[in-house]
């Protein structure tokens, strides 16, 4: 009889540690978040929507929403006692000291994963299209209007200035920049902002084409642009140096992102650091992407993620992204009023002003080919697309300088 009682007590003890025993009406949102994580993985595998991002994030959401007893002293969660806690006096987040997830998350909360990703992006980016046609930088800059428009709308809805700035950056369609800025301005919103930014990056093929078609005529979609001129190796080497000096001397607060972006590009273009460039655009960016996506997913614990505030962030992020896409297209239409025939820009490349490289440029190409199968817009769209990377980092620097 004592043996049976011993077994029953131990089984009851073991049951108390299981996720099934710790599901309640209060934390039942874990099941919903688990379903969202599975949906992200489905989109990545079945629809090929940003699999390099959505699979780590989706699986991280599964890991971050495993219920466990908060009073057991287990050092396995991301936040203290399995919950997201903000100190009422300092506003700082309390994390679970010694947790492996907490150690990995350090790169997110302190903002050093995004600059490493920008190093890799710089090492894999060819700025030739922008160098050959510098006026396309204006198209990339115009798309950043969505960031500041969303910032003003968020302020009007009652978000604080720092929260509004972090939310607005979603419109740049740049996940690392969104994470970097939110880690500085609104760390308590980082999970929702990061998931929203990466979600909209993945859904570019769904969001952008209807906006592009609604704002252009069939004649405009058929505009043919001259092939970009050739760019010398010397120009490619000078560009990251001059780009760094021109942007960071004006906006020093953008240095962590812009400095690493242009440094990575110099490694690529200088011709004498091939091994470093290959490492930056290969193993390094892959490792950091895995850690960033996974830990961001883990931070979406239902106990604080499923709130009306998070829903508002997703709505504002979508609005910011829509405004950014529309701004790029409309700016090209306006710019064409001042350009002679034969030098006009196809407004379909205006969508590429957001920072999602090269997916936004591919959308320009795909939509354009539907109206003229011989009109290849990809190389033209890469100009505003890479300009958008620089523009979103500059916009983040501006917001950080004023609000940080």
Image: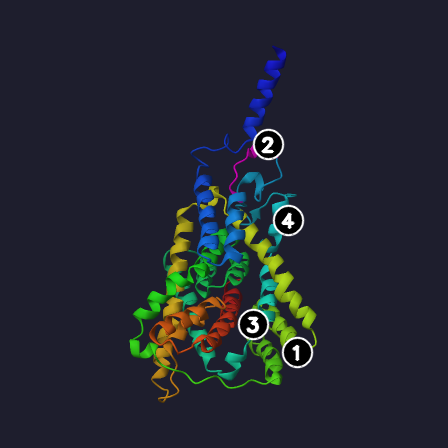
Asked if one can make out residue 299 in the rendered structure from this viewpoint, the answer is: no
Alpha carbon distance from label 4 to label 2: 20 Å
Alpha carbon distance from label 2 to label 1: 55 Å
Name the residue tied to disc 4.
103
**Which of 270/258 is in front?**
270
Asked if one can make out residue 15 in the rendered structure from this viewpoint, the answer is: yes
Where's residue 240, x and y in %?
60, 77
Q: Earlier in the sequence, mark 3 or mark 4?
A: 4
Where's residue 107, x and y in %?
61, 55
The magenta stretch spans which residues? 64-73
Name the residue tied to disc 1.
270
Question: Residue at coordinates 33% horizontally, 65% vertically from top-left?
Answer: 210
Mark 3 or mark 4, which is nearer to you? 3
Name the residue tied to disc 2.
72
**Which of 381/69 is in front?**
381
Q: Earlier in the sequence, mark 1 or mark 3?
A: 3
Q: Earlier in the sequence, mark 1 or mark 4?
A: 4
**Which of 62/377 is in front?**
377
């Amino acid at each position: 009889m004592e043996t049976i009682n011993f077994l029953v007590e131990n089984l009851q003890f073991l049951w108390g540690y299981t996720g099934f025993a710790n599901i309640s009406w209060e934390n039942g949102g874990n099941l919903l978040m688990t379903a969202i994580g599975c949906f992200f993985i489905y989109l990545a595998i079945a629809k090929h929507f940003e699999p390099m991002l959505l699979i780590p994030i989706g699986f991280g959401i599964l890991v971050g929403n495993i219920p466990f007893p908060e009073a057991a002293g287990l050092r396995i969660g991301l936040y203290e006692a399995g919950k997201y806690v903000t100190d009422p006096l300092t506003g700082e987040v309390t994390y679970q000291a010694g947790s492996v997830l907490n150690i990995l998350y350090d790169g997110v909360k302190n903002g050093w994963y995004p600059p490493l990703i920008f190093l890799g992006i710089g090492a894999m980016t060819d700025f030739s299209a922008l160098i050959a046609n510098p006026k396309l930088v204006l198209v990339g800059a115009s798309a950043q209007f969505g960031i500041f428009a969303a910032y003003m709308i968020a302020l009007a809805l009652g978000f604080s200035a720092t929260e509004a700035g972090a939310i607005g950056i979603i419109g740049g369609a740049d996940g690392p920049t969104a994470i970097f800025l939110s880690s500085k301005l609104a760390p308590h919103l980082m999970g929702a902002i990061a998931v929203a930014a990466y979600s909209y990056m993945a859904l570019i093929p769904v969001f952008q084409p209807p906006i592009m078609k609604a704002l252009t005529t069939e004649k405009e979609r058929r505009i043919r642009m001259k092939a970009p001129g050739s760019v010398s190796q010397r120009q490619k080497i000078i560009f990251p140096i001059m780009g760094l000096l021109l942007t960071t001397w004006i906006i020093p607060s953008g240095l962590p992102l812009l400095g690493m972006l242009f440094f990575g590009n110099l490694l690529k273009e200088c011709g004498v650091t091939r091994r470093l460039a290959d490492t930056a655009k290969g193993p390094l960016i892959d490792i950091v992407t895995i850690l960033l996506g996974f830990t961001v997913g883990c931070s979406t614990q239902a106990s604080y993620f499923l709130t009306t505030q998070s829903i508002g962030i997703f709505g504002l992020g979508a609005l910011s992204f829509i405004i950014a896409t529309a701004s790029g297209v409309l700016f090209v239409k306006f710019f064409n009023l001042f350009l002679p025939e034969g030098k006009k820009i196809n407004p379909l490349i205006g969508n590429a002003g957001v920072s999602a490289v090269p997916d936004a440029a591919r959308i320009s190409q795909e939509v354009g080919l539907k109206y003229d199968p011989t009109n290849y817009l990809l190389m033209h769209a890469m100009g505003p697309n890479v300009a958008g990377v620089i523009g979103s980092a500059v916009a983040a620097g501006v917001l950080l300088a004023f609000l940080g």
